[in-house]
Image (cartoon, rainbow, N blue to C red):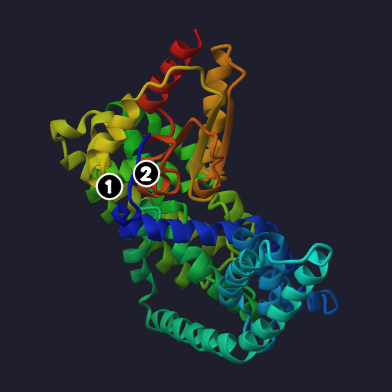
Protein backbone atom coordinates (compact mmCIF):
# COMPACT_ATOMS: atom_id res chain seq x y z
CA UNK A 1 0.00 0.00 0.00
CA UNK A 2 0.97 3.65 -0.39
CA UNK A 3 2.67 5.43 2.47
CA UNK A 4 3.29 9.16 2.64
CA UNK A 5 4.69 11.12 5.53
CA UNK A 6 2.45 14.02 6.54
CA UNK A 7 5.38 16.43 6.27
CA UNK A 8 5.33 15.75 2.53
CA UNK A 9 1.82 17.09 2.11
CA UNK A 10 1.84 20.49 0.42
CA UNK A 11 0.34 23.63 1.87
CA UNK A 12 -2.26 23.51 -0.89
CA UNK A 13 -3.50 20.12 0.28
CA UNK A 14 -3.73 21.40 3.84
CA UNK A 15 -5.73 24.44 2.75
CA UNK A 16 -7.98 22.15 0.69
CA UNK A 17 -8.63 20.08 3.79
CA UNK A 18 -9.46 23.21 5.77
CA UNK A 19 -11.85 24.32 3.05
CA UNK A 20 -13.42 20.88 3.03
CA UNK A 21 -13.94 21.09 6.79
CA UNK A 22 -15.68 24.46 6.45
CA UNK A 23 -17.82 23.12 3.63
CA UNK A 24 -18.95 20.12 5.63
CA UNK A 25 -19.85 22.36 8.52
CA UNK A 26 -22.04 24.49 6.26
CA UNK A 27 -23.40 21.97 3.76
CA UNK A 28 -25.75 19.98 6.06
CA UNK A 29 -27.33 23.28 7.10
CA UNK A 30 -27.81 24.81 3.64
CA UNK A 31 -31.53 24.03 3.81
CA UNK A 32 -31.86 26.23 6.91
CA UNK A 33 -29.98 29.05 5.17
CA UNK A 34 -32.29 28.78 2.17
CA UNK A 35 -35.33 28.83 4.46
CA UNK A 36 -34.04 32.04 6.00
CA UNK A 37 -33.39 33.46 2.52
CA UNK A 38 -36.94 32.69 1.38
CA UNK A 39 -38.45 34.23 4.52
CA UNK A 40 -36.28 37.31 4.00
CA UNK A 41 -37.13 37.61 0.30
CA UNK A 42 -40.87 37.34 0.98
CA UNK A 43 -41.62 39.16 4.20
CA UNK A 44 -39.18 42.05 4.79
CA UNK A 45 -40.53 45.53 3.87
CA UNK A 46 -38.92 45.39 0.41
CA UNK A 47 -39.87 41.73 -0.19
CA UNK A 48 -42.40 40.09 -2.46
CA UNK A 49 -45.08 39.85 0.27
CA UNK A 50 -44.20 42.36 3.05
CA UNK A 51 -45.52 41.13 6.38
CA UNK A 52 -44.62 42.88 9.62
CA UNK A 53 -45.44 39.85 11.79
CA UNK A 54 -43.62 37.18 9.79
CA UNK A 55 -40.63 39.45 9.17
CA UNK A 56 -39.89 39.09 12.91
CA UNK A 57 -38.54 35.64 12.07
CA UNK A 58 -35.62 37.11 10.13
CA UNK A 59 -33.55 38.57 12.97
CA UNK A 60 -33.69 35.72 15.52
CA UNK A 61 -33.07 33.12 12.82
CA UNK A 62 -29.86 34.71 11.59
CA UNK A 63 -28.73 35.67 15.09
CA UNK A 64 -29.37 32.40 16.90
CA UNK A 65 -30.61 29.48 14.78
CA UNK A 66 -28.09 29.54 11.91
CA UNK A 67 -24.92 30.08 13.98
CA UNK A 68 -25.99 27.44 16.50
CA UNK A 69 -26.63 24.93 13.70
CA UNK A 70 -23.13 25.60 12.37
CA UNK A 71 -21.67 25.23 15.86
CA UNK A 72 -23.51 21.96 16.50
CA UNK A 73 -22.37 20.49 13.20
CA UNK A 74 -18.76 21.60 13.71
CA UNK A 75 -18.66 20.28 17.25
CA UNK A 76 -20.15 16.97 16.15
CA UNK A 77 -17.58 16.60 13.37
CA UNK A 78 -14.73 16.93 15.86
CA UNK A 79 -16.09 15.54 19.13
CA UNK A 80 -19.32 13.68 18.43
CA UNK A 81 -22.64 14.54 20.03
CA UNK A 82 -21.06 15.62 23.31
CA UNK A 83 -18.68 17.86 21.41
CA UNK A 84 -21.65 19.30 19.50
CA UNK A 85 -23.40 20.23 22.74
CA UNK A 86 -20.28 21.88 24.16
CA UNK A 87 -19.73 23.74 20.88
CA UNK A 88 -23.26 25.14 21.03
CA UNK A 89 -22.77 26.24 24.65
CA UNK A 90 -19.61 28.15 23.75
CA UNK A 91 -21.18 29.67 20.65
CA UNK A 92 -24.02 31.06 22.74
CA UNK A 93 -21.39 33.08 24.55
CA UNK A 94 -20.03 34.68 21.38
CA UNK A 95 -23.56 35.37 20.10
CA UNK A 96 -24.66 37.20 23.23
CA UNK A 97 -21.31 38.93 23.55
CA UNK A 98 -21.46 40.57 20.11
CA UNK A 99 -23.81 42.68 18.03
CA UNK A 100 -23.28 40.99 14.64
CA UNK A 101 -24.38 37.58 13.34
CA UNK A 102 -21.70 35.22 14.64
CA UNK A 103 -21.17 32.85 11.73
CA UNK A 104 -17.40 33.11 11.97
CA UNK A 105 -17.58 32.69 15.73
CA UNK A 106 -19.74 29.58 15.37
CA UNK A 107 -17.32 28.08 12.84
CA UNK A 108 -14.49 28.57 15.34
CA UNK A 109 -16.07 27.89 18.72
CA UNK A 110 -18.18 24.93 17.54
CA UNK A 111 -15.19 22.81 16.48
CA UNK A 112 -13.21 24.16 19.46
CA UNK A 113 -15.89 22.83 21.81
CA UNK A 114 -15.76 19.48 20.04
CA UNK A 115 -11.98 19.34 20.37
CA UNK A 116 -12.07 20.24 24.10
CA UNK A 117 -14.76 17.62 24.71
CA UNK A 118 -12.80 14.95 22.88
CA UNK A 119 -9.65 15.69 24.87
CA UNK A 120 -11.60 15.78 28.13
CA UNK A 121 -13.31 12.45 27.47
CA UNK A 122 -10.01 10.89 26.53
CA UNK A 123 -8.46 12.15 29.79
CA UNK A 124 -11.34 10.75 31.87
CA UNK A 125 -11.41 7.42 30.05
CA UNK A 126 -10.98 4.45 32.42
CA UNK A 127 -10.85 6.83 35.38
CA UNK A 128 -14.56 6.94 36.23
CA UNK A 129 -15.75 4.63 39.04
CA UNK A 130 -18.45 2.17 38.06
CA UNK A 131 -21.91 3.64 38.54
CA UNK A 132 -20.75 7.25 38.25
CA UNK A 133 -20.46 7.39 34.46
CA UNK A 134 -23.62 9.46 33.88
CA UNK A 135 -22.84 11.90 36.68
CA UNK A 136 -19.29 12.49 35.49
CA UNK A 137 -20.25 12.73 31.84
CA UNK A 138 -23.02 15.26 32.46
CA UNK A 139 -21.07 17.38 34.93
CA UNK A 140 -17.98 17.39 32.72
CA UNK A 141 -19.98 19.07 29.95
CA UNK A 142 -21.65 21.38 32.47
CA UNK A 143 -18.43 22.52 34.15
CA UNK A 144 -16.38 22.84 30.97
CA UNK A 145 -19.33 24.54 29.29
CA UNK A 146 -19.52 27.08 32.11
CA UNK A 147 -15.93 28.17 31.60
CA UNK A 148 -16.18 28.05 27.81
CA UNK A 149 -19.31 30.22 27.62
CA UNK A 150 -17.73 32.82 29.93
CA UNK A 151 -14.47 32.89 27.94
CA UNK A 152 -16.43 33.03 24.68
CA UNK A 153 -18.49 35.95 25.96
CA UNK A 154 -15.63 38.07 27.28
CA UNK A 155 -12.70 37.07 25.04
CA UNK A 156 -13.46 35.06 21.90
CA UNK A 157 -16.56 37.00 20.87
CA UNK A 158 -14.97 40.47 21.02
CA UNK A 159 -11.82 39.29 19.21
CA UNK A 160 -13.85 37.71 16.41
CA UNK A 161 -16.02 40.81 16.17
CA UNK A 162 -12.93 42.98 15.65
CA UNK A 163 -11.59 40.61 12.99
CA UNK A 164 -14.98 40.44 11.32
CA UNK A 165 -15.30 44.20 11.18
CA UNK A 166 -11.79 44.49 9.74
CA UNK A 167 -12.57 42.05 6.93
CA UNK A 168 -15.94 43.70 6.35
CA UNK A 169 -14.35 47.14 6.16
CA UNK A 170 -11.74 45.90 3.67
CA UNK A 171 -14.32 44.31 1.38
CA UNK A 172 -16.69 47.28 1.68
CA UNK A 173 -13.79 49.54 0.71
CA UNK A 174 -13.43 47.50 -2.47
CA UNK A 175 -17.17 47.88 -3.09
CA UNK A 176 -17.26 51.63 -2.52
CA UNK A 177 -14.14 52.22 -4.62
CA UNK A 178 -15.42 50.05 -7.46
CA UNK A 179 -12.57 47.58 -7.14
CA UNK A 180 -14.66 44.57 -6.02
CA UNK A 181 -14.11 42.84 -9.40
CA UNK A 182 -10.40 42.43 -8.62
CA UNK A 183 -11.42 39.67 -6.21
CA UNK A 184 -11.66 37.49 -9.31
CA UNK A 185 -7.86 37.48 -9.36
CA UNK A 186 -8.10 35.36 -6.22
CA UNK A 187 -11.41 33.58 -6.75
CA UNK A 188 -10.88 31.98 -10.15
CA UNK A 189 -7.42 30.42 -9.57
CA UNK A 190 -8.60 29.28 -6.12
CA UNK A 191 -11.61 27.49 -7.62
CA UNK A 192 -9.48 25.53 -10.07
CA UNK A 193 -7.19 24.47 -7.22
CA UNK A 194 -10.18 23.34 -5.11
CA UNK A 195 -9.60 26.16 -2.62
CA UNK A 196 -12.83 28.04 -3.29
CA UNK A 197 -14.58 26.64 -0.23
CA UNK A 198 -12.13 28.41 2.06
CA UNK A 199 -13.11 31.73 0.51
CA UNK A 200 -16.83 31.10 0.08
CA UNK A 201 -17.66 29.42 3.38
CA UNK A 202 -15.11 31.33 5.44
CA UNK A 203 -15.49 34.88 4.13
CA UNK A 204 -18.08 35.66 1.46
CA UNK A 205 -21.09 33.79 2.85
CA UNK A 206 -20.80 35.16 6.41
CA UNK A 207 -20.38 38.68 5.00
CA UNK A 208 -23.31 38.09 2.68
CA UNK A 209 -25.59 37.03 5.52
CA UNK A 210 -24.71 40.15 7.49
CA UNK A 211 -25.38 42.40 4.50
CA UNK A 212 -28.64 40.62 3.72
CA UNK A 213 -29.89 41.27 7.24
CA UNK A 214 -29.58 45.00 6.59
CA UNK A 215 -30.25 45.28 2.85
CA UNK A 216 -32.31 42.19 2.08
CA UNK A 217 -29.72 40.92 -0.43
CA UNK A 218 -25.97 40.72 -0.96
CA UNK A 219 -23.54 40.73 -3.87
CA UNK A 220 -21.03 38.74 -1.81
CA UNK A 221 -22.94 35.53 -2.54
CA UNK A 222 -22.06 35.95 -6.23
CA UNK A 223 -18.44 37.09 -6.34
CA UNK A 224 -17.14 33.51 -6.54
CA UNK A 225 -20.18 31.37 -7.38
CA UNK A 226 -21.21 32.87 -10.75
CA UNK A 227 -21.67 29.94 -13.19
CA UNK A 228 -21.18 32.27 -16.16
CA UNK A 229 -17.37 32.11 -16.55
CA UNK A 230 -17.36 28.32 -16.50
CA UNK A 231 -20.23 28.20 -18.99
CA UNK A 232 -18.37 30.50 -21.38
CA UNK A 233 -15.22 28.39 -21.19
CA UNK A 234 -17.08 25.14 -21.88
CA UNK A 235 -19.00 26.72 -24.77
CA UNK A 236 -15.70 27.80 -26.32
CA UNK A 237 -14.38 24.25 -26.04
CA UNK A 238 -17.62 22.99 -27.58
CA UNK A 239 -17.11 25.13 -30.71
CA UNK A 240 -13.34 25.44 -30.95
CA UNK A 241 -11.90 22.62 -28.84
CA UNK A 242 -10.18 19.55 -30.24
CA UNK A 243 -10.86 15.81 -30.11
CA UNK A 244 -12.11 14.51 -26.76
CA UNK A 245 -12.24 17.95 -25.13
CA UNK A 246 -14.66 19.13 -27.80
CA UNK A 247 -16.81 16.01 -27.45
CA UNK A 248 -17.08 16.08 -23.65
CA UNK A 249 -17.64 19.83 -23.20
CA UNK A 250 -21.40 19.78 -24.02
CA UNK A 251 -22.06 17.18 -21.35
CA UNK A 252 -19.96 19.15 -18.90
CA UNK A 253 -22.06 22.25 -19.63
CA UNK A 254 -25.26 20.55 -18.47
CA UNK A 255 -23.74 19.31 -15.23
CA UNK A 256 -21.91 22.59 -14.52
CA UNK A 257 -24.57 25.15 -15.41
CA UNK A 258 -27.75 23.32 -14.44
CA UNK A 259 -26.39 20.89 -11.86
CA UNK A 260 -24.14 23.43 -10.19
CA UNK A 261 -21.05 21.19 -10.05
CA UNK A 262 -18.33 23.66 -11.06
CA UNK A 263 -15.60 21.04 -10.80
CA UNK A 264 -16.66 19.97 -14.29
CA UNK A 265 -14.75 22.79 -15.97
CA UNK A 266 -11.57 22.59 -13.86
CA UNK A 267 -9.79 20.04 -16.12
CA UNK A 268 -10.42 22.23 -19.16
CA UNK A 269 -8.65 25.14 -17.47
CA UNK A 270 -5.80 22.91 -16.32
CA UNK A 271 -5.44 21.58 -19.86
CA UNK A 272 -4.70 25.09 -21.15
CA UNK A 273 -3.61 27.13 -18.11
CA UNK A 274 -3.77 30.37 -20.12
CA UNK A 275 -7.57 30.07 -20.07
CA UNK A 276 -7.48 31.13 -16.42
CA UNK A 277 -7.24 34.64 -17.89
CA UNK A 278 -10.64 34.10 -19.49
CA UNK A 279 -12.07 32.93 -16.16
CA UNK A 280 -10.69 35.96 -14.33
CA UNK A 281 -11.95 38.43 -16.93
CA UNK A 282 -15.32 36.68 -17.03
CA UNK A 283 -15.57 36.82 -13.25
CA UNK A 284 -14.66 40.51 -13.24
CA UNK A 285 -17.22 41.28 -15.94
CA UNK A 286 -19.92 39.46 -14.00
CA UNK A 287 -19.20 41.26 -10.73
CA UNK A 288 -19.09 44.62 -12.53
CA UNK A 289 -22.48 43.92 -14.09
CA UNK A 290 -23.96 42.90 -10.75
CA UNK A 291 -22.69 46.16 -9.29
CA UNK A 292 -24.13 48.26 -12.11
CA UNK A 293 -27.57 46.75 -11.55
CA UNK A 294 -27.17 46.78 -7.73
CA UNK A 295 -28.10 43.10 -7.80
CA UNK A 296 -27.78 40.52 -5.05
CA UNK A 297 -29.03 37.19 -3.74
CA UNK A 298 -30.75 36.47 -0.44
CA UNK A 299 -28.59 33.45 0.44
CA UNK A 300 -25.59 31.49 -0.78
CA UNK A 301 -26.37 29.42 -3.90
CA UNK A 302 -25.23 25.91 -3.11
CA UNK A 303 -24.71 24.25 -5.49
CA UNK A 304 -23.81 27.08 -7.86
CA UNK A 305 -26.54 26.23 -10.37
CA UNK A 306 -28.45 28.75 -12.45
CA UNK A 307 -31.58 27.31 -10.84
CA UNK A 308 -30.23 28.16 -7.38
CA UNK A 309 -29.38 31.67 -8.59
CA UNK A 310 -32.90 32.30 -9.87
CA UNK A 311 -34.55 30.73 -6.81
CA UNK A 312 -32.63 33.02 -4.45
CA UNK A 313 -33.08 36.22 -6.47
CA UNK A 314 -35.12 38.84 -4.59
CA UNK A 315 -37.78 41.07 -6.08
CA UNK A 316 -36.49 43.53 -8.68
CA UNK A 317 -33.13 41.80 -9.18
CA UNK A 318 -33.78 39.30 -11.97
CA UNK A 319 -32.54 41.52 -14.80
CA UNK A 320 -29.31 42.27 -12.93
CA UNK A 321 -28.69 38.64 -11.97
CA UNK A 322 -29.34 37.26 -15.44
CA UNK A 323 -27.30 40.04 -17.06
CA UNK A 324 -24.35 39.35 -14.76
CA UNK A 325 -24.35 35.66 -15.65
CA UNK A 326 -24.73 36.34 -19.38
CA UNK A 327 -21.99 38.99 -19.50
CA UNK A 328 -19.60 36.73 -17.59
CA UNK A 329 -20.42 33.92 -20.02
CA UNK A 330 -19.85 36.10 -23.08
CA UNK A 331 -16.51 37.50 -21.90
CA UNK A 332 -15.20 34.10 -20.88
CA UNK A 333 -16.37 32.59 -24.17
CA UNK A 334 -14.72 35.25 -26.33
CA UNK A 335 -11.38 35.19 -24.49
CA UNK A 336 -11.26 31.38 -24.36
CA UNK A 337 -12.13 31.18 -28.06
CA UNK A 338 -9.20 33.45 -28.95
CA UNK A 339 -6.85 31.35 -26.81
CA UNK A 340 -8.05 28.09 -28.38
CA UNK A 341 -7.71 29.45 -31.91
CA UNK A 342 -4.21 30.80 -31.28
CA UNK A 343 -2.88 27.69 -29.53
CA UNK A 344 -2.70 24.82 -32.02
CA UNK A 345 0.33 23.08 -30.58
CA UNK A 346 0.32 19.28 -31.14
CA UNK A 347 0.73 18.60 -27.44
CA UNK A 348 -2.70 20.10 -26.85
CA UNK A 349 -4.62 18.13 -29.50
CA UNK A 350 -5.46 15.12 -27.41
CA UNK A 351 -7.51 15.71 -24.27
CA UNK A 352 -6.10 12.80 -22.31
CA UNK A 353 -2.50 13.86 -23.01
CA UNK A 354 -3.25 17.42 -22.00
CA UNK A 355 -4.95 16.32 -18.80
CA UNK A 356 -1.94 14.15 -17.95
CA UNK A 357 0.28 17.18 -18.48
CA UNK A 358 -1.82 19.32 -16.18
CA UNK A 359 -1.86 16.51 -13.64
CA UNK A 360 1.95 16.52 -13.65
CA UNK A 361 1.88 20.22 -12.83
CA UNK A 362 -0.62 19.91 -10.00
CA UNK A 363 -0.22 16.53 -8.32
CA UNK A 364 3.01 15.78 -6.52
CA UNK A 365 4.39 12.31 -6.07
CA UNK A 366 3.23 10.95 -9.42
CA UNK A 367 5.65 8.03 -9.09
CA UNK A 368 3.76 6.96 -5.97
CA UNK A 369 0.50 7.20 -7.87
CA UNK A 370 1.92 5.02 -10.65
CA UNK A 371 2.92 2.38 -8.15
CA UNK A 372 -0.56 2.40 -6.66
CA UNK A 373 -2.17 2.07 -10.09
CA UNK A 374 0.07 -0.86 -11.01
CA UNK A 375 -0.56 -2.71 -7.78
CA UNK A 376 -2.75 -5.71 -8.45
CA UNK A 377 -3.91 -7.34 -5.26
CA UNK A 378 -5.78 -10.49 -6.16
CA UNK A 379 -9.37 -10.94 -5.15
CA UNK A 380 -12.72 -9.42 -6.10
CA UNK A 381 -13.63 -5.86 -5.14
CA UNK A 382 -16.29 -5.26 -2.50
CA UNK A 383 -16.23 -1.54 -1.73
CA UNK A 384 -15.17 1.37 -3.96
CA UNK A 385 -15.49 4.90 -2.63
CA UNK A 386 -15.69 8.09 -4.67
CA UNK A 387 -14.54 11.13 -2.70
CA UNK A 388 -14.38 14.88 -3.13
CA UNK A 389 -14.09 18.04 -1.09
CA UNK A 390 -17.64 18.05 0.27
CA UNK A 391 -18.74 14.53 -0.61
CA UNK A 392 -21.90 15.67 -2.38
CA UNK A 393 -20.84 17.15 -5.72
CA UNK A 394 -18.45 15.56 -8.16
CA UNK A 395 -18.06 12.42 -6.05
CA UNK A 396 -21.82 11.82 -6.04
CA UNK A 397 -21.96 12.19 -9.80
CA UNK A 398 -18.91 9.97 -10.25
CA UNK A 399 -20.31 7.23 -8.01
CA UNK A 400 -23.65 7.28 -9.83
CA UNK A 401 -22.03 7.01 -13.25
CA UNK A 402 -19.71 4.24 -12.08
CA UNK A 403 -22.56 2.20 -10.59
CA UNK A 404 -24.42 2.54 -13.88
CA UNK A 405 -21.40 1.20 -15.76
CA UNK A 406 -21.12 -1.74 -13.34
CA UNK A 407 -24.82 -2.56 -13.71
CA UNK A 408 -24.46 -2.63 -17.49
CA UNK A 409 -21.72 -5.22 -16.98
CA UNK A 410 -24.03 -7.25 -14.76
CA UNK A 411 -22.05 -6.47 -11.58
CA UNK A 412 -24.27 -5.55 -8.64
CA UNK A 413 -22.40 -6.88 -5.60
CA UNK A 414 -19.85 -4.04 -5.29
CA UNK A 415 -20.70 -1.20 -2.91
CA UNK A 416 -20.07 2.15 -4.61
CA UNK A 417 -20.77 5.27 -2.55
CA UNK A 418 -19.65 8.89 -2.37
CA UNK A 419 -18.05 10.56 0.64
CA UNK A 420 -16.05 13.59 1.61
CA UNK A 421 -12.41 12.59 1.74
CA UNK A 422 -12.13 12.43 5.51
CA UNK A 423 -15.24 10.22 5.81
CA UNK A 424 -14.21 7.41 3.45
CA UNK A 425 -14.65 4.05 5.25
CA UNK A 426 -11.41 2.36 6.27
CA UNK A 427 -12.46 -0.90 4.62
CA UNK A 428 -12.63 0.67 1.13
CA UNK A 429 -10.39 -1.12 -1.34
CA UNK A 430 -10.18 1.84 -3.73
CA UNK A 431 -10.75 5.57 -3.39
CA UNK A 432 -11.44 7.50 -6.60
CA UNK A 433 -10.71 11.25 -6.46
CA UNK A 434 -9.78 14.14 -8.69
CA UNK A 435 -6.03 14.37 -9.25
CA UNK A 436 -5.89 17.74 -7.45
CA UNK A 437 -7.07 16.03 -4.25
CA UNK A 438 -4.56 13.17 -4.36
CA UNK A 439 -2.22 14.52 -1.66
CA UNK A 440 -5.01 15.25 0.76
CA UNK A 441 -6.53 11.81 0.18
CA UNK A 442 -3.33 9.83 0.57
CA UNK A 443 -2.42 11.76 3.72
CA UNK A 444 -5.80 10.90 5.25
CA UNK A 445 -5.92 7.29 4.02
CA UNK A 446 -2.30 6.12 3.58
CA UNK A 447 -3.25 2.44 3.53
CA UNK A 448 -5.95 2.56 0.86
CA UNK A 449 -5.27 2.47 -2.87
CA UNK A 450 -6.06 5.82 -4.48
CA UNK A 451 -7.08 6.18 -8.11
CA UNK A 452 -7.16 9.67 -9.59
CA UNK A 453 -9.08 11.04 -12.53
CA UNK A 454 -9.06 14.39 -14.30
CA UNK A 455 -12.14 14.25 -16.52
CA UNK A 456 -15.40 13.35 -14.83
CA UNK A 457 -17.17 12.45 -18.06
CA UNK A 458 -14.62 10.46 -20.05
CA UNK A 459 -11.49 9.42 -18.20
CA UNK A 460 -9.57 6.30 -19.28
CA UNK A 461 -8.72 5.62 -15.63
CA UNK A 462 -12.35 4.66 -15.01
CA UNK A 463 -12.34 2.28 -17.96
CA UNK A 464 -9.11 0.71 -16.69
CA UNK A 465 -10.63 0.23 -13.25
CA UNK A 466 -13.70 -1.40 -14.79
CA UNK A 467 -11.50 -3.79 -16.75
CA UNK A 468 -9.61 -4.70 -13.59
CA UNK A 469 -12.87 -5.37 -11.75
CA UNK A 470 -14.05 -7.68 -14.50
CA UNK A 471 -10.72 -9.57 -14.59
CA UNK A 472 -10.72 -10.11 -10.85
CA UNK A 473 -14.34 -11.17 -10.75
CA UNK A 474 -14.24 -13.58 -13.65
In the shown orientation, is residue 114 left or right of residue 401?
right
Between the residue at mark 2 and the residue at mark 1, the CA separation in whole angstroms equals 10 Å
Q: Nearer the viewer, residue 278 or 61?
A: 61
Residue placed under numbered mark 1 in the picture: 362
Can residue 178 be seen here? The reply is yes
Residue furthest to the bottom in view is 154
Residue 155 in percent (x, y) is at 57, 90
User: Neighbour class for label 1 at 10 Å: few (<14), some, many (≥20)?
Assistant: some
Coordinates of residue 45 in the picture (x, y in percent): 74, 78
The quarter holding residue 318 reads bottom right
Look at mark 2 in the image and give the residue it sits on.
Answer: 438
44 to 398, vertically: above or below: below
Mark 2 or mark 1: whose residue is earlier in sequence? 1
Q: Residue at x 44, y 52 (%)?
A: 228
- Identify the residue at image location x=63%, y=62%: 79
Relative depth, front residue between 336 and 123: 123
Please, is residue 439 above or below residue 62 in the view? above
Q: Secondary structure at mark 2?
A: helix
Q: Secondary structure at mark 1?
A: helix
Q: Could you say which is closer to the camera, residue 52 or residue 9?
A: 9
Q: Position of residue 106 (x, y in %)?
A: 61, 73
Amino acid sequence: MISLNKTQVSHRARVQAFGGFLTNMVLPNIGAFITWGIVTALFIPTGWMPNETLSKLVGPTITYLLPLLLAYTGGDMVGGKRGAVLGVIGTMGVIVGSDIPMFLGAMIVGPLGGWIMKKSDRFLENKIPAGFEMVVNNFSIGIIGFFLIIIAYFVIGPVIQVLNKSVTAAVEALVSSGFLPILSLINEPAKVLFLNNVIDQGIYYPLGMQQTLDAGKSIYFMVASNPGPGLGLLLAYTFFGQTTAKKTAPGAIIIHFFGGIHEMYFPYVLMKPLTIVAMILGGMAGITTFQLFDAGLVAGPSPGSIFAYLALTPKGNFIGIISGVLVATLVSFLVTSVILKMDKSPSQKDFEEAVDKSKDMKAQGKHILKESMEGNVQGAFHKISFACDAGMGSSAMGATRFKTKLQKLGITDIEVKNYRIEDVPADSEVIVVHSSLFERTIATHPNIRVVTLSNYLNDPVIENLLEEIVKRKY
